[in-house]
Amino acid sequence: MSILLDDVAFSYNLPKKDGRFIFEHVHAEFSPGHFYAVMGPSGSGKTTLMKLMSMELSPSAGAIHYDDKDITALSRQTLLQTRISRIYQDYLLVPYLSARDNVLLAAEILGKGRTSQDKDRAEELLHTVGLDTELWNQEVLSLSGGEQQRVAIARAIIRDTPVLLADEPTGSLDDENTMKIAQLLRDIAHERNRVVIACTHDIECARLADDILSIRNRGLVSLREEDNHA
Amino acid sequence: MRRHVKMAILSILHTLGASSIFLIVVMLGTASTLIFGAYIQSQYDAYDEAARSPFGKYDAIVSTYSPEARSILTSLEDAGKAEPIAYSSGTLVTPTFSDYVSITYTARESHIGTLLRGRYPKKDNEIIISQPLFQQLHSQLGGTITLKDASGASEEAYTIVGIAVNTTRRDEKYAIAVQRQMATSLSQTWLLDDYDDRLEPYRIQEVLTYARKIWLQHGLDGELAHRTLQYAPYIQYGVLCVGACGIILYFLSRKKALLRDYHILRALGDSRWNAARTVIIPDIILLLTGIGAGGLLGYLIFMWVREPFGHMLNQEWLLAPYNAFANTGNTILIISMLAVIVALCIIFMNKVQTRYYHHLRSRTMWWICVGIGLVLTIIFTILRQTFIFPWGHLFAMGIGGLTFSAGAVLIATVPKLHATRIIGSRLAWFKVLTNTVVFILCFHASMYTCIATLNLDFMQTRVNNVSRWISIGQLEESSVRDLKVKFPNIMNESYQFINPDITNGVPLIISAADKNCFIGASHPGEPGCEAAMTAQIRLAEPDSPAATLALKVHSEYHLKQDSVYAFVESRDDSPVKEQDIKEISPVHVDELLDGEIYPGLVLTVDSEQAKALGIKPSMYSDLLVPHFEHFTEQERIEFRAALLSHAPHSLLTESDYADFRKTVGEGLSWSFASIVLAFVLLLSVAGLTLADQEEVRRYAYISGTRQKYIYMLGMPVILPYASAVIFGTLFGRLNAMDHIPIIRQGTPWQNFGWYWTAPLLALVWIIPALALLCAQKREKQRR
């Protein structure tokens, strides 16, 4: 499943911001089997881009297409259930559930029920993201920021949707785990033929991406294309 | 479904601290309310029973029954289905005491009033006496007293075996003896185990002729007894509303967590309905569990205590609780559900910051205090209702106010523990005390407003039922004169009974039929002394035994001749005529009322006769308005309103007895003052809340938030407080408004309470709801 941003513009239209546009005339295409890193300074609109692609926000102009289908033709619930998974900057975990239950909750909502395979799959993913076994049954509230982030990543991955949107997925991780997670995201994109888009500040994480998109002048610029042009 | 259940359980366990406290509060609230409700209901019924028949049986007044009826009653007595009861009076003598008391003779052990100590008499020489009498005698159980019957027919020694108090006659000195012989010889009343259709014609005849005013009075007493406790449900509503506010506060404090869980589930692709259902289920489970467990707890406690309490308080009340449970339970359920709905509306609609800064340091100690407060509130309420401690309601109000407001604040503070640890608790004390005052005022306003209603209804009922007679506690002579000036049309045809009891005379019943009755010893509703109750003094035939006895008693007590008054006998079969009056007393009546209700001596205000008699009554107990039914509605309203404004306050006591009830005037003034003060305090609370949110306010200022949003910060807190105050006061007002005219510049205005109070009550919720809706709509439009 590919994603196409076609002449997208967006403004929060807040009174204090005088209608200033965050994005204007944005053209971008995200293809399956690729891992994209979106970079930009704070406040440049990385999270806004995630929200636009997950229908949390609607573009002021232009259109977003999922496989040539306009996003507005879909309901947000359908989009979240069938096409995209998100890793949130502030994790959004249910605090009183364990790490494993948080992961299973996502699978259950998506699958409308819980299967025995889901449990094995959840444990496998928790192992993959590097969460110690003894933490699996602990309330996520008692986990550290990095550990919670890994639970959030596992929760997003178990949903196995065509698109994975990750907002600062390695923000709370050390270098070793950052690389591990970045590699995992890259593997998901390549091995499962998924679209993985990660907004990040981390250069190390971005280096593993197939393409790095930079937010400049209210638009998205592909560094790979720039290099090619250069 | 498994997910919902699991998340619900885990959510409850996760917030065990807050939720368990919430659970306990709901539980205790429900249980105490149920018990309170059951208790009130039982007292209500007990009053009813006591007013209709002190023995909880059918009674038959036989003084004018035909021989046929008497034979029926005799046959019933032989079959053990009827018992004679005799009311008398006499002198009770001990080495240190001698006074008149009323005496009840029964043929067998009967339950009258509430047995406080000891037991009921079983033998002929045993007696139980009232608590006031016992206190005055300084005697002990097992002590001996001597009773001299008024007729002089008997003088017997009795052993005190019990102490009783009758809730409808709690100030009265009386004694009850099991004396079959006396009961049979003196009895004019028979108590029947079951109603007997054969007696119905005689009962009807009794009502229509001789005894009709007694039956009327009897019915009114029952009605008044009902009204005496009618304020209780309002207090209950007030308590429930405060509890509902606590629930609202709980949900508001949970807003952040609920929204967080909701958004997580939505972000994971869950539907709105599923997500909302999942996050709200734990709290609903808690609420229902609290109500259910509380109901069970209340039921168990009630079942446990009803036997001893039932025996102690009133035998009849055992029948009451089940209906009370059902009614109270429904009320709790409805109010709780409304609270949840309101809370959810606020949570999902309100975009305003809802941070609470109630600063409490040690929750455990506070909860212990709240628990103790609850128990004390209940205890003081019971003590007051049983008249063991008449001032108990004041303590209950004070402690209850402190307890409920502290509880509400505690519920709100549970999730804010981190803030409480940082900031300290001084402000919390101030806030709780402020809340307490608000609650007390609500309580106070509701109660006194209802008492105001009670008094007016008391008067109106009589006016409406009797058509022509108004009785209002005790009215000062100056007030009567004012009324006469203000309402010459009405007062020109009005008369005052001169109550000898208030002129320092010893009132006597001088009648062949009622030779044993003394006014001071009689009681409304007691057959046999009805004349004493109604006409105060009745005329006896010259040279009749009754007249001889009157003169004997008169001389015995060294009374002046001119303080014996004569009244006209109303009975058709009375041989006494008007002219006979002069033969027994030099009194000339201004006018005789030949109506069927309360004929007797009536003197107009400024009566020359009264002056000639040297009667200087300071108070008028009754007021006759012979043609009240012919006056226009406006005149009636004005007159009633004027009566209200003249009602005295000096004799208003804690008693529920009709003669001592608070008057409407005081009720009105208190309730209005309470409402005004409550609103002033509400504004103070609002100000305090805004001051509390200083941190948020400062943040809002720095971030350039508009001033109006800063003011809106207090809205979520103000709403529950506003509802507490307004519910507390308006529930009481609602019933009162239709009846109590507002006096403006001396002119009474009928204000049609329901028509404007109900919309006002609705506006309490509608205006904030609309404001929030509009705010939300604007927000959407901006987006």
Image (cartoon, coloured by chain):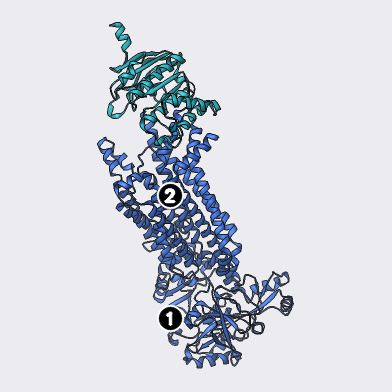
Residue of label 1: B617
Q: Nearer the viewer, residue B678 or B572?
A: B678
The x, y position of residue B761, in whole percent, is 44, 50
Q: Colour of chain B?
A: blue
Mark 2 and mark 1: span between their CA atoms?
Answer: 54 Å
Judging by the rendered image, the residue that carries numbered circle 2 is B246
Q: Could you tell me the amino acid type at mark 2?
A: Gly
Query: Which residue is drawn at the image coordinates 55% and 51% (left, top)?
Result: B330
Marked residue nearer the N-terminal end (2 or 1): 2
Check the rendered structure and report the hue given to chain A: cyan
Q: Quadrant of residue B645?
A: bottom left
Residue B772 percent location from the top left of the image = 39, 39
Most foreground residue, B566 or B227: B227
In the structure shown, which secondary structural element does the residue marked by tag 1 occupy? loop
Residue A135: x percent and y percent? Answer: 43, 33
Contact flag, marks 2 and 1 (Cβ < 8 Å): no
Q: Is residue B699 visible?
A: yes
